Image (cartoon, helix red, strand yellow):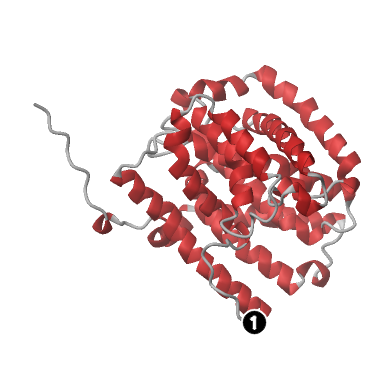
Amino acid sequence: MAKAARGQGGEGRDAYFDNAKYLAIVLVAVGHSWPLVLSGSRTTETLYMWVYVFHMPAFILISGYFSRSFDMKPRKLMRLVSSVVVPYVVFQTAYAVFFGVMGDERVPVRMLSPWFLMWFLMALFFWRLLTPLFMAVRWPVTLALLLAAGASAVPGISEQLSAQRILQFLPFFVLGLRLRPEHFRLVQRWSVRWASIPVCAVSMAFLYWVVPHVQLDWVYRNHASQDMGQPWWVGMLMTFAMFAAALVLTACFLAWVPRRRMWFTTLGAGTIGGYLLHGFVVRYAEYAGWAEKFGLNTPLGRVVVTVGAVALVTVLCTPVVRKVLKPVTEPDLGWAFRKEPKDVSR
């Protein structure tokens, strides 16, 4: 599959993974927009929780898959700084200014406590640095799961560095590190595709039943179980349960990602723009009270919000936006790093 799709996404890219990245970022944007219209709709709450179970795990798993070659060589470190650290600093500052203007108050520009969706870039930075370790140990996914389970029983660690989310989502990144093209070919079988339909239906029915009784913080993965009024051991059990549920639904999602080039394939290369920019619109809509102002808390209104989120993130992933953001998201930092010494052979 990977070899067949190679080159179909443009510039030697893999069409399958570009399609997956675009569809995953669409789910992220839709998930962020639904809180505007959650109240009064059990169906929307169910879909919201269902999407949140796997949309970031899928995105993170793919990020891990493409981080397999990361090492501590200057070229890779330069790439890490230019594609992760620089965008984080710029947009972390931008979000602080934005929240200050919207709230008409002074908001501190803090670098150790990510605003809103900026936690992902901070997490990606630490995950990449840990890549050589998890590529070297024998049972990397097991180790990552134990770290995640341990974090779930330690309250208060989310206050700095988004440590709770970094550790809770770590198993998906590490799993991505260990995957190979044949694993993606496996989930693309028609038997897996057809099996995914009843699996998704059953999972939605189950969530529709439990959604009035369960805390959304379990899917956000940003609090320890004690912070949610639960015993420490419940958090550990939920860590393993949520990992299994996310893994199954991620497989269902990846099973239906098109392998061939689609109209949206090229947008997969610009997901960083869609991720970083859509948050401004979503947060502005919350501050401005669009749901009440435009009567969006209706079935039609929820459809409008969903379609609007898809359209918004699609535009933000276009090559034009990617080109405009390039000085921030893909700056040339060659001037700041020494060149790697060439190997000297006898």
Q: Residue furthest top?
A: 191
Instruction: Give the quadrant of residue 204.
Output: top right
Residue 243, image x and y in percent? 69, 34
The kind of secondary structure element at disc 1 is loop
Determine whether 337 is above or below 46 in the image. below
Q: Amino acid at mark 1?
A: Glu
Is 236 left or right of 206, judged from the image as shown?
left
As rendered, which of 193 and 287 lies closer to the eye?
287
Instruction: Give the quadrant of residue 286.
Output: bottom right
As rendered, which of 219 and 232 lies closer to the eye?
232
Residue at x 60%, y 29% (from the top left corner)? 142
Residue at x 81%, y 59% (from the top left corner)? 37
Residue 80, image x and y in percent? 40, 49
As rendered, which of 149 and 214 lies closer to the eye?
149
Quadrant location, the C terminus: top left
Q: Residue furthest left?
A: 346
Say whether residue 259 is visible.
no
Q: How many marks?
A: 1
Residue at x 85%, y 61% (from the top left corner)? 297
Residue 119, image x and y in percent? 58, 55
Determine whether 288 is above or below 114 in the image. below
As rendered, which of 305 and 235 lies closer to the eye?
235
Q: Name the residue carrying label 1.
A: 105
Is 9 left or right of 147, judged from the image as shown?
left
Residue at x 49%, y 34% (from the top left corner)? 65
Residue 206, image x and y in percent? 86, 35
Instruction: Give the quadrant of residue 203.
Output: top right
- Crowdedness near tag 1: few (<14), some (14–19) or many (≥20) residues, C-alpha within 10 Å: few
Say whether residue 319 is visible.
yes
